[in-house]
Image (cartoon, rainbow, N blue to C red):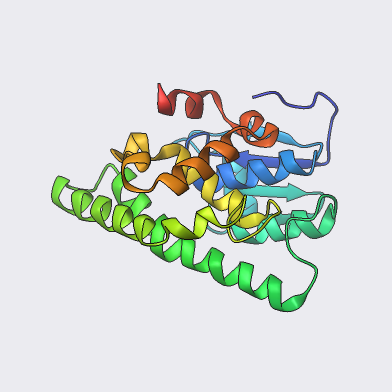
Amino acid sequence: MALLAKKSSMIFFSDPLDHYSHRVRIVLLEKSVTVDIKDIDPNAIPDILSDINPYNNLPTLIDRGLVLYEPNIMMEYLDERFPHPPLLPVYPVNRAKIRLLIHRIQNDWCKPVDIILSPKTKPTPAQRARKELIDSLSSVNSLFAEKEYFMSDDFTLLDCCMAPILWRLPALGIDIEKHAKSISAYADRLFERRSFKESLSELEKDVRD
């Protein structure tokens, strides 16, 4: 992916195939943040991370003296640090609704995705997780026909969480157009955004080939 050549005090250690890293990269591109993105093999994490991250995991964001190692906290931090364009609503009630939906995405969709993608998962549990994900997405398909983005006329952190999952569905053995046409159309809108296109690592570009 294209990176800004200008040196930055911000460094993002990113797994080039991980959907959690991907959501943060989308936020960074939406905000046009000058950042040094380092693609890291999760099986060969550099020693520097063990010194600054108690979990020694990816993704990890360093902004001067601040170290963050939870992707949702990174997204909210970036939205507050770089307020334009805003990716969370202004009003507290609406912000709380977005946070709750992100929590639901984590529980209802990220968990089965993680099970399917794990090399340790056996075929039967993977198939159960695949069915769970298909059923869950299909059950909310109509919601995606109401607005241009997820429950909103504006692009938000919700969409930053959804786009990496939807991009990976073919690799998970899921034809979303077959099961949820409105979600499929929504995914196409997300994939056309400049921030999404530029957020893709070289490995992620191959996910759909």
Query: Is residue 69 visible from the viewing direction of this image?
Result: no
Q: Position of residue 81 (x, y in %)?
A: 83, 56
Please tell me which residue lies in front, 144 or 105. Answer: 144
Which residue appears at 50% of the width and 41% of the height?
185
Q: In screen coordinates, is 157 left or right of 36? A: left
Identify whether 98 is placed above or below 66. Answer: below
Q: Position of residue 201 (x, y in %)?
A: 56, 28
Residue drawn at (69%, 32%), measured in percent from left and top? Answer: 194
Residue at the spot x=51%, y=54% of the render? 144
Task: Tell me the quarter of the image containing the C terminus.
Answer: top left
Q: Residue at x 28, y 41 (%)?
A: 119
How many numbered marks have been drawn onto this rendered protein structure?
A: 0
Q: Position of residue 177 (x, y in %)?
A: 37, 40
Q: Position of residue 100 (x, y in %)?
A: 56, 72
Q: Does 179 sit left or right of 16 as displayed?
A: left
Residue 140 versus residue 17: which sits nearer the camera?
A: 140
Q: Report the quarter where the N terminus lies.
A: top right
On screen, residue 18 versus residue 80, left or right, reads: left
